Amino acid sequence: MMNIGILPLEKVKKGVMVEEIDFQSHAPFKSSFFTIKPGAESPVDSHKVKETWIVVGGIGTLTCDDTKIILKKGSVVLFESFNTHSVKNNGNTDLSIVSIWWDAIDD
Amino acid sequence: MMNIGILPLEKVKKGVMVEEIDFQSHAPFKSSFFTIKPGAESPVDSHKVKETWIVVGGIGTLTCDDTKIILKKGSVVLFESFNTHSVKNNGNTDLSIVSIWWDAIDD
């Protein structure tokens, strides 16, 4: 059994924090705790790696390409390569997401 | 972007619930929401697949092989193949874990 460390908190912008989980080479994916404070909105992101968001607390509105959906505790979404995505916390508690990403395999 | 569904809640035993996230073939791992109610303890588990627990709420005591450690929000542990593991919720709120598992690659 291994204790896995957490890298220092990165403030992406005011109210948007990422703490990457330091799996090093021990897992076939990377992961972070992603926290958005009430009223804050994450910058639009887009990348080749695939990513899933597992929502573990709070409520927010996800904008992905031209689609808007509500995210709340228990929601899970998966972004394909180069989907643009950002989320706004519409609630009054932290929006807490476990993000996991991995290499897209070219078809 | 894909909305990912959640499979029906499985009661492993009294106070121990698993809700598997239905990634189908879209991710290189499997994952579930794993919830242990106050006072409950998960059955001892051991398997070839590797597994990580990302603790998103609550507090508990993990027993892994001969080691006991405290788990709390923000703790992350990784189980190697055939580590035995169980966790007891020592707190007075739900112990909430995101579990992720994947095939162990034979060396």
Image (cartoon, coloured by chain):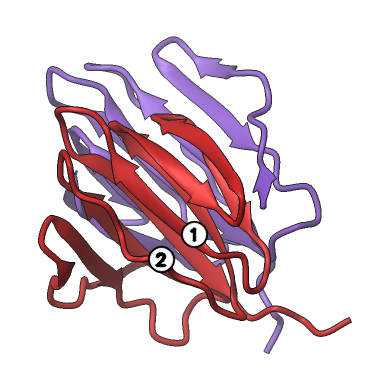
Chain colours: A purple, B red
Q: Quadrant of residue B34?
A: bottom left
- Quarter of the image containing the C terminus of chain A? bottom right
Lateral position of residue A8 relative to residue A89, left or right: right
Subunit under mark 1: B
Residue A39 shows which numbered tag?
Answer: none
Q: Which residue is disc 2 drawn over? A: B44
- Mark 1 or 2, nearer chain start: 2
Secondary-structure class at tag 2: loop
Labelled pair 1, 2 in contact (Cβ < 8 Å)? yes
Q: Which residue is disc 1 drawn over? A: B85
Q: Quadrant of residue B13?
A: bottom left
* Nearer to us in this view, B1 or B70: B70
Q: Amino acid at mark 2?
A: Val
| Residue neighbourhood size for the residue with mark 2, other residues' Cα within 10 Å, grouped as few (<14), some (14–19), many (≥20) | few
Separation of marks 1 and 2 at Cα, in angstroms: 5 Å
Secondary-structure class at tag 1: strand
Residue B100 showing in the rendered view: yes
Residue A31 showing in the rendered view: no
Residue drawn at x 47%, y 31% as measured from the top left: B70
Give the vertical position of B50 relative to B67 (above or below): below
Residue drawn at x 49%, y 59% as measured from the top left: B85
Subunit under mark 2: B
| Residue neighbourhood size for the residue with mark 1, other residues' Cα within 10 Å, grouped as few (<14), some (14–19), many (≥20) | many
Residue drawn at x 44%, y 70% as measured from the top left: B45
Give the vertical position of B35 relative to B81 (above or below): above
Q: Amino acid at mark 1?
A: His
Q: Position of residue B14 (x, y in %)?
A: 10, 62
Lateral position of residue B67 relative to residue A14, left or right: right
Q: Position of residue A99 (x, y in %)?
A: 47, 47
